[in-house]
Image (cartoon, grey):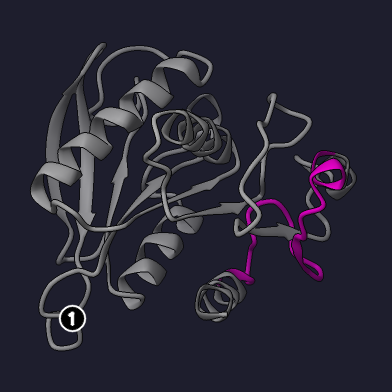
Amino acid sequence: MNIQTKKFFIRGAAGQLECALDLPAADHFPSPRGIALVAHPHPLYGGTMDNKVAQTLARTFNKLGYAAVRMNFRGVGGSEGVHDAGAGETDDMAVLLAHMQQQYPELPVALAGFSFGTFVQAQLQQRLIAQGSAAERLVLVGAAAGKWAMPAVPANTILIHGEQDETIPLSDVFDWLRPQDISVVVIPGADHFFHRKLQHIKSLMVEMWHR
């Protein structure tokens, strides 16, 4: 956790939810140019908002000028409730989005997730599309294809996956993306948790965001 990280709580359907906000450097961005919600990996397998990939996503969004907010899913850290297989977690993420939009009205929104968090964010994006208020972009790292019923994603989604992902095989990601005709960037030698490969996530994301 960065020393500048602001911890706060919001109220979800299952109780309080522990959140963390990181703001972009004020000397480069006097005010944020957008809001980014970052979702962590599976809570039943040790996933928390302090996961290194989730923190990398948050810091990268800061570099892009976004206020980046993370949330511990139900039953993790200071968040109340119990794991709800993605349904309640998507509801909670929508509550966090509403909270952030109250704090930073009229700013564009980005959704990002790692592993299980990609399932939550892809579901939330589909909900926002149905409401006519889609997030400007999704960033999905280690997309949970084959593990959960991943919905379709917009064509401008940034997808990053590890070549040697032992948890979510690359072939499952290809099977999910093939009908959508969407590309995925594969990091050679990277495992599911991107050990010693986190810098590639950051550099790829910045490059693709501006492309």
Q: Secondary structure at mark 1?
A: loop
Closer to us: 36 or 162: 36
Q: Tell me which corner region of the image, top left, top right, bottom left or bottom right, holds residue 188.
A: bottom right
For the point 40% across and 48% down, the residue is 38
51 relative to 95 in the view: left or right: right
Q: Is residue 180 magenta?
A: yes
Furthest-bottom residue in this view? 27
Furthest-front residue in this view? 132
Q: Tell me which corner region of the image, top left, top right, bottom left or bottom right, holds residue 48.
A: top left
- Residue 50 placement (x, y as % from top left): 37, 49
- Residue 96 placement (x, y as % from top left): 25, 35
Residue stretch rendered in magenta on the structure? 176-198
- Say which residue label 1 marks: 29
Closer to us: 51 or 62: 62
Closer to us: 134 or 64: 134
- Residue 52 placement (x, y as % from top left): 47, 57
- Residue 6 placement (x, y as % from top left): 13, 54
For the point 88% across and 40% down, the residue is 175
Q: Tell me which corner region of the image, top left, top right, bottom left or bottom right, holds residue 150.
A: top right
Q: Note whether 121 is above or below 163 in the view shown.
A: above
For the point 12% across and 72% down, the residue is 31
| Quadrant of the snapshot with the C terminus | bottom right
Type of secondary structure dominating the magenta stretch: loop
